[in-house]
């Protein structure tokens, strides 16, 4: 990935690095390529991962890159180990994208949480609020996981989910509560 960034990839339209163990260093390098403008035609980035393949360093770098990469249409980041800071940074990146942004699909489901469930739910809420406020103007599909650990948390997430869907009915939101996971973890 470092070599790609250094050389630039002006013709690269799709990068598929799914199910690789590139780790944070590889994820940061790909984010650098995406945000540098050296891959101006990169429209689809697939980083579907082995569980815990990417952590916060890569997630934060990718969020920064998303704010700059207006040509990006699809970003797949499921099944990684992102903390709440990554989800908050992604929400901020989505809000600061210009109206020319092409991002239509954002997948962040299946992540292994590196924080407490309530903190993770609050971070997911930030993305829902960003969508309700107009982030991803061309958005069509967003996948998040709403992991609610208690009644108050579930109520807050439900409120944001409904507000997001009311404000942006054309976005199909996979905003799932994983109550069975919460129950099996003894959180209900």
Image: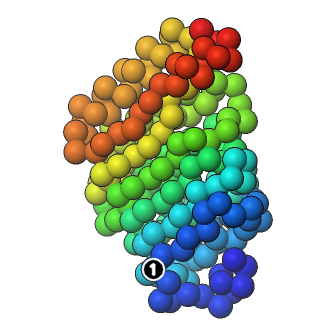
Q: Is residue 84 visible?
A: yes
| Residue 120 appears left or right of 155 | right
Quarter of the rendering containing residue 65: bottom right
Indicate whether 87 appears above or below 105: above
Q: Position of residue 102 (x, y in %)?
A: 34, 65
| Residue 124 appears left or right of 24 | left
- Residue drawn at 53 percent across, 42 percent down: 109
Q: Position of residue 23 (x, y in %)?
A: 76, 60
Display colour scheme = rainbow
Which quarter of the rendered picture does the N terminus lie within? Answer: bottom right
Q: Position of residue 150 (x, y in %)?
A: 56, 11
Which one is in front, 123 or 181? 181
Indicate whether 57 appears above or below 172: below
Indicate whether 93 appears above or below 72: above
- Residue drawn at 60 percent across, 23 percent down: 181
- Residue drawn at 64 percent across, 12 percent down: 187
Which quarter of the rendered picture does the C terminus lie within? Answer: top right
Q: Is residue 85 visible?
A: no
Q: Which residue is mark 1?
A: 13
Q: Position of residue 99 (x, y in %)?
A: 31, 61
Quarter of the rendering containing residue 7: bottom right
- Residue drawn at 30 percent across, 28 percent down: 163
Question: Secondary structure beneath disc 1?
Answer: loop
């Amino acid at each position: 990935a470092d070599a790609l960034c250094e050389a630039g990839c002006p013709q690269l339209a799709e990068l598929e690095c799914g199910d690789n163990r590139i780790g944070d260093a590889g994820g940061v390098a790909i984010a650098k390529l995406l945000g540098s403008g050296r891959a101006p035609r990169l429209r689809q980035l697939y980083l579907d991962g082995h569980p815990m393949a990417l952590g916060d360093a890569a997630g934060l770098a990718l969020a920064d890159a998303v704010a700059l990469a207006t040509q990006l249409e699809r970003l797949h980041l499921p099944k990684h180990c992102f903390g709440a800071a990554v989800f908050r940074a992604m929400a901020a990146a989505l809000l600061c994208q210009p109206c020319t942004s092409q991002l239509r699909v954002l997948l962040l489901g299946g992540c292994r949480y590196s924080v407490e469930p309530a903190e993770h739910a609050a971070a997911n809420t930030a993305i829902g609020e960003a969508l309700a406020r107009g982030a991803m103007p061309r958005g069509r599909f967003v996948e998040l996981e709403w992991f609610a650990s208690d009644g108050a948390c579930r109520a807050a997430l439900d409120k944001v989910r409904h507000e997001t869907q009311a404000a942006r009915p054309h976005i199909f939101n996979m905003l799932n509560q994983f109550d069975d996971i919460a129950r099996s973890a003894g959180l209900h």
